[in-house]
Amino acid sequence: MLDRQAYIEFLLDHYQNPRHKGRIEDADVVVSGGNPGCGDVVTLYIKKGDDGTLENVQFEGEGCTISMAGASIIAEMASGQPIQEFEDMGYEEIVELMGKDVVMSRVRCATVGLGTLKAGLQELRAKRIRAGGP
């Protein structure tokens, strides 16, 4: 368990040096989400693998430090991982990962990346079903 200062440094690092930032031109799904009250906007580009994994997840967006750090963290975590893992992930998990006492007053900002990813995964599933896939 990190202390409060370590969580703040972790978030600032993701904000100042975002991972997986930029578009994917041949993304399977492009989905936007946000927190209009705060001005947080996140667009995720999702490329799925052939084996039920997320081959790559990239993001673009603007907003507060917490929302942009959260988008960077979720894009980094999701790339190369099983889709199911993120369909099942609870919002509490990302809040804990980002430092509950640091982001507790800004949970909507902290979870915008995960919420947008979940919306994108629903869209991926709908496309698979429409295409006659499992």
Image (cartoon, grey):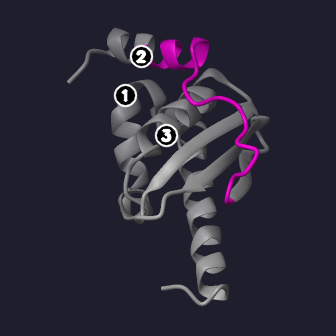
Q: Nearer the viewer, mark 2 or mark 1?
A: 2
| Element at label 3 | helix
Q: Earlier in the sequence, mark 2 or mark 1?
A: 2
69 and 83: which one is in front? 83
User: What residue sits right under mark 1 in the picture?
Assistant: 99
Local crowd size for mark 2, using a 10 Å CA cut-off: few (<14), some (14–19), many (≥20): some
User: What residue sits right under mark 3 in the picture?
Assistant: 74
Q: Tell me the chief SS of the magenta region.
A: loop
Kind of residue at disc 1: Gly
CA distance separating discs 2 and 1? 9 Å
Q: Are marks 3 and 2 in contact (CB under 8 Å)?
A: no
**Residue occupying the point 67% across, 46% down:** 44
Residue 10 is tagged as 2
**Residue occupying the point 25% across, 19% down:** 2
* Image coords of residue 117 (percent x, y): 57, 53
Is residue 103 highlighted in magenta?
no
